[in-house]
Image (cartoon, rainbow, N blue to C red):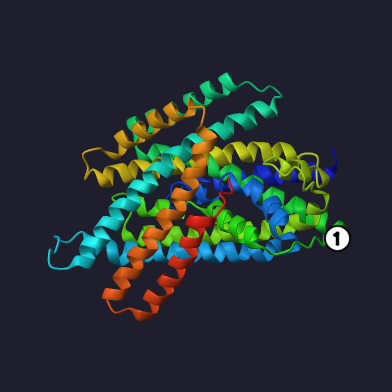
Amino acid sequence: MSLFDVILILVASGSVALLLHPRLIHNRFWRAVVTPLASIIGSGFLVVAPLLYFSVGSYALIAMTGIVLLAYAIGAAIRFNIQFVEPFLERPPDSHQRWIKLIRELERFSNLILSFAYIVSVAFYLRLLTSFVFEGIGYKNELLENILTTAILLTIGIVGHLRGLQQLEFLEEYSVATKLGIIATLLLGLLFYDLHHPHFPMHTKAFSWTTLEILGGILLVVQGFETSKYLKGMYSVQERVQSMRTAQIISGIIYIVFVALITPLLYHLNLQSVDETAIIQLSRYASIVLPYLLILGAVMSQFSAAVADTIGSGGLLSIETHGTISFKTGYLMVALIGSALVWSANIFEIITYASRAFALYYLLQVLIAMIFARYQKLSVRAVAFFVLALILLFIVVFGKPAE
């Protein structure tokens, strides 16, 4: 082990310790940021760079920047709904205005779509987590993976049911802190490698219809910011809006910087066998400790993303049942349904539908923002939301799920 490897371990440890500082952990705004941030930086972080390089070659950084900006625009539409549409819908229904009825129906339908996507995603994230765990110890056993996945799911559900959101956020903060600390270490390791190996791989890729389909699917890699919308009752409108914006900015910077720094290493990528372990293998060129840190980071990514989606789904169930199902009961229901899905032979096929469901949810939310802006005579915003809706319609119909 070299001196640089020791430095990377110290950086990782120091970063995690800093992110777990009591003043930060007990900061209300940071707790609100952690939930969407955990969901955005999920399993997609490991696969996004190889997938972009496979799809658009040397233009991966440009494509990643475009995807981040598009996701931020979608987030802006959802933040618009939180600030303006949500309070409007809390008023008594006006039977004389059809557009209000339409918005209510779209909101309800979008929530149903999202609840399906969340529940399946939670099961998928944790199943992927156990796959990394068993791959790390060099022993693959599907039965044991299912048992471990179910155990983690039930633990999350029971903790959420008994202790509520704050205890789940506590678990989530530790996993997010570990993940962000490892990401900071990875970026430092990549920067050091790039300074000593200034090679930019020129891999040209013909732009085609398939390229657009794949790029549309990659948008779902940065999915998760919408969880802020469903923390209603726990945080104020402004806290939810600002926490979502902050989470998108932090994650966007991380994704863009990561793709920029990993690009020289993509020269070693085998384009014939791109999978979720590609980044782990490539990191060996930069440091011998990075692959082990990345495996730990991957496990934390799946756990924190699963907790974030459990929180979002539990809140969604409570909202849609008007409190009949409490937040705590919602967490337990998500865990039980997710456990049933884990034992389904089609869990990895179902995630394909869940990915498309996320895109459909975003489309419906943008349509809600567009209709509201139109009838409130906010012409510029209405046009912007219309253009965004067309892009999302393309993704719903043609996008290839990146998962």
| Residue holding disc 1 | 199
Asked which quadrant contains residue 130, the reply is top right
Q: In this rendering, would 116 be left or right of 355? A: left
Q: Which residue is drawn at the image coordinates 41% and 71% (left, top)?
A: 386
Would residue 201 appear left or right of 394 to someone viewing this image? right
Q: Residues within 10 Å of mark 1 (few under 14, many from 20)?
A: few
Q: Is residue 67 above or below residue 26?
A: below
The residue that appears at 17% across and 61% down in the rendered structure is: 91
Answer above or below: position of 105 versus 119: below
94 relative to 41 in the view: left or right: left
The residue at 53%/62% (across/down) is: 249
Picture quarter containing residue 329? Answer: top left
Residue at 76% over, 50% down:
189
Q: Nearer the viewer, residue 296 or 266?
A: 266
Q: Nearer the viewer, residue 166 or 251?
A: 251
Quarter of the image for the C terminus: give it: top right
Residue 86 visible somewhere in the drawing: yes
- Quarter holding residue 334: top left
Q: Secondary structure at mark 1?
A: loop
Residue 14: where, in percent of width, then height? 65, 45
